[in-house]
Amino acid sequence: MDGVKDLVKVLTTSNGKVALEKATRTVLELGKVDENKLKLVEEEGLIGGLVRVMRKDGERFRVAREDAVRAIMWISKGGSAEVKERLFMHEELIAGLVAIVGQNGSEYKWAREKAVAAIHNIANGAVLVKKGLFKHEGLIAGLVEILGQRGVEHKTARENALWAINNISSGADAEVKKGLFKHEGLIAGLVEIVGQKGREYKWARKKAVEAINSIAKRNVGLLHFPELMLHIEAIIGDATLSGKDTKKMALKLKKKIEHMGGGGQSNPSSTQSFGSNTAGSVRMEKELAEMRTEQAEMRTEQAAIKSSLTSVQDSLFRVEKALATLTSTLAPTETLDLNDISTTLSNPPPLTDSTGNNKRSNLAILADNQDSFNHTLKKVKKEKEDVSRSLSALEDAETCTVCLVAKRGVLFLPCGHLVCCGECSERVDECPICRKVIRKRLTVFM
């Protein structure tokens, strides 16, 4: 490939709009040819130059920025595992793609679509690459945000995000799958897409069901999403919502959820939702819903208490400031403790000049306000102590009863107590509250 070094020089040093547009477009066309992909990745400075252009803000560099992202997308598309691994090892590249994924401006719409496409291309590589992408700060959160964007204008970005999640989870190790399941908002976002009815979601529904199947495995956390089974049954029963492959994956996921809800007794011929398989599963769902409601109420109360504490602290500050203003009118030798003011006023020294009258007036003001200040200070301090105690009690209610550090997150069955964190729950055989033998543990995500 003649002239590549000249391209690298332009990409790494030039700030000219036209020069950067020509250079990125040339690399883009070269990247479409399979035999060029590895050579481009191995060319010193070329990927770094593309990253430099990707990071240029503003409308002026929009075309060059988009072509730089497209170049990465084409180089990674269909390339060998070595190409994908080399691209992944370029830390600035992944960070640059993640940064573009996180942009919400209309001028980044097209670049964002191609950045997500580049990520799902790279994710279709070795297990170590999948794990590295999963752990990259901000990547999964950015993909989840795109999943939540509705409308036809976000269709391509949304589908590319689903593809990326599928490629990261497919063939990944247990650590990655577990981490993806626990990632805030990911499963909820996938479930929401499964429930979309529009024609523009037909392919997205398929990928969302596929992703849940891949990530969840036998994770009983799926029981926290009772609406999922309703969406799956709709897909199975309505041919307009899915194709043959989607229906097949939906049936597989339904069987998996029924197996969990039935306490391990799978019933393939059942067409009922997992919530009606057994009385035990219904009771468990009801208890989990009640616990989530209680948790939400506790958080609301905690926020109110924190707000009250802030108000009390503001009141205390205002009182202390007013007291400081009054006492500052006295000479240093005459500034007295509030407890001694009444004694001083009972035997005031004779003052005949105007200065003395001013001082007497100041002392009189302090005497008039002494009781009010003392009462307000005591009230504010008492309220502050009460609020602090209430806040501590709420925090204790969320804390593991064993280690007293981590938050509670494991539900014990059959007693139904939620008192331990995940780590401590593995170390106890009996419930710390009622001493019943623990038959089953359910992780609860609040």
Image: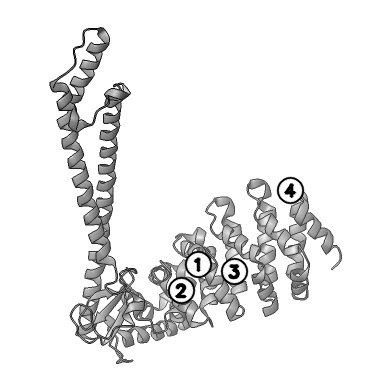
Amino acid type, mark 3: Ile
Question: Which mark is first along the chain, 3 or 2?
Answer: 3
Badge 2 marks a residue whose secondary structure is helix
| Residue 273 drawn above or below residue 315 | below
- The answer to whether the residues at label 1 and label 2 have Cβ atoms under 8 Å apart is yes
Q: Classify mark 3: residues with Cα within 10 Å, few (<14), some (14-19) or many (20+).
A: many
| Local SS, label 4 | helix
Residue at the image point whose x is 19% and y is 51% from the top: 386
Residue topped by disc 2: 180
Which badge, 1 or 3, is on the more N-terminal residue? Answer: 3
Residue 272 in the figure: left or right of residue 100: left
Mark positioned earlier in the residue sequence (1 or 2): 1
Give the residue type at disc 2. Answer: Leu
In the figure, 322 relative to 251: above or below? above
Tags 4 and 3 touching, CB below 8 Å? no
Residue annotated with mark 4: 17
Q: Residue at x 76, y 62 (%)?
A: 45
Circle nearer the viewer, 1 or 4: 1
Q: Which mark is residue 119?
A: 3
Q: Which mark is residue 334?
A: none
Q: Position of residue 46 (x, y in %)?
A: 75, 63
Q: CA distance from mark 1 to mark 4?
A: 32 Å
Would you say residue 273 is visible in this rendering?
A: no
For the N terminus, give its image quadrant: bottom right
Which residue does the image show at 39% across and 83% down from the upper left?
Answer: 253
Q: Above or below — where is 6 with respect to 213?
A: above
The percent coordinates of residue 366 (x first, y second) are 20, 25
Residue 193 location, x and y as percent?
A: 42, 69
Which disc number belongs to residue 140? 1
